[in-house]
Amino acid sequence: MSAPATPKGLRTRERLIEASGAVFARKGCAASGVADICAAAGLAVGGFYRYFASKEEIIAALTRELRDELICAISGLPQQEDAEKEALAIAGAFFEAASARLDSFKAMREAEAADEALARDFYGPLAEVLAGRLGRFTPGPRAAAHAWALLGMLYFYAVKFMVWDKGAVPARASAAAARLCAKGLSEKSFPWWEPALAGPTKVRPAPGDTGAIMLAAAEEVFGRCGYNGARVSEIAKKAGFAAGTFYLFFASKEEALEKVVMRMRDCLVKKAAAYSAGAGNRVETEAMAFRALFDFIREHPYGYRIMREAEFTDESLADAYYGYILRNYAAQLKKTAVAGEFNIDDHELLALALMGIGHMLGMKRVLWGGFRGMSENELLKAVFEGIK
């Protein structure tokens, strides 16, 4: 739906978009209504529909505006003389633009989990711009790999420092992302593995384990329907039981979501540990952890949506999942990594970078079928080696 083609109409449309960002950031997209947006914009509810057909349409408009501002900020940068300076300039522009539209950034994070088309429309063009700028220093397929990896690092740094910590992204984070993008994760040789060794190994609930069966059903229903759309009766039906059986295992739908999140976290941690059990050094451990993450995503295709919706349903779940993984990840790197083994020594920033890279590459490759023509080994080798 198009806004009236008048200066006043365009201003009103923009006011609605700005108000929606503030409302979504405060209440969450799912819990906000058109009336909330109109109240924040000082507009009658009926006037909303002159500009947007639905709440979903204004969410899409908000995320497109944020994407376009990020693209404009990055595209307008002068070209740098080497890849590290180029990545550093990109990082600075990304954080500045995201900070200026922080409400929109927060809303986009919630909305993208439930709408794959919106996520593709946001990240795809943005990654293309990054690949175009990095492509001056590395061939096309590798440029795409570096672009998505850099985008993952910038995304996780922005979430950590701007959203969770409610502050500014420190300069050291921009420098870390730039160095890891250009120089790679480590100077050590990338540990190649045989494709035949890879593959999902999801453990199915035992036929008589009613609790595990119910938990697996809850994961699928939350993933398909979203938290707000999921019904206790549907979870029980999916598990093959009467609705009342649900309450033998969960006090509420909220508790079921919490247990699903904890189960997913523990599954990922155990899988990463199992895959890297035979690693000879920390770099090999991280390579195997990426392989474990990709297989985990294949086994839990709804994981991205569940974790994002869980975070907005109960903020403590974000810390219980991401915070827990980050703290333990950083502690393990500090304990086991040899000095100079990785190209940055800040263990928290390194852990965040690895989480961000895994998040973005996993989404692009496993869920969206991206990086065609590059094997999983070739993709990760590019990221580990850096731009050459």
Image (cartoon, rainbow, N blue to C red):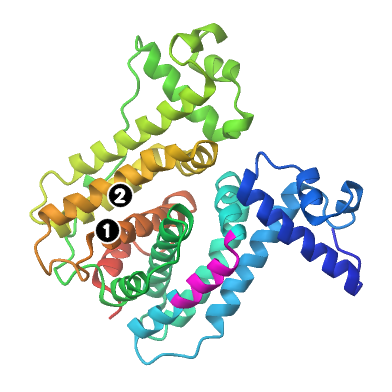
Name which quarter of the figure residue 152 lies in: bottom left
The label number, if any, that marks residue 348 in the structure image? 1
- Tell me the residue that label 2 is attached to: 326
Quadrant housing the C terminus? bottom left
Part of the protein shown in magenta = 92-102
Numbered label tally: 2
Residue 158 or residue 216, whichever sits in front: 158
Camera sees residue 301: no
Secondary element under disc 2, as helix, strand or loop, is: helix
Residue at point 13% right, 43% down?
Answer: 277
Residue 80, horizontal then vertical, whole percent? 41, 90
Structural crowding at the residue carrying mark 1, measured as other residues with C-alpha within 10 Å and reported as few (<14), some (14–19) or many (≥20)? some
Q: Residue at x 76, y 45 (%)?
A: 36
Q: State the residue at coordinates (41%, 37%).
A: 300
Left or right of 28? Residue 325 is left
At label 2, counting other C-alpha atoms closer than 10 Å, the crowd grade (few under 14, some 14-19, many 20 or more) is many
Q: Earlier in the sequence, mark 2 or mark 1?
A: 2
Q: Is residue 104 visible?
A: yes
Is the C-beta separation of discs 2 and 1 under 8 Å? yes
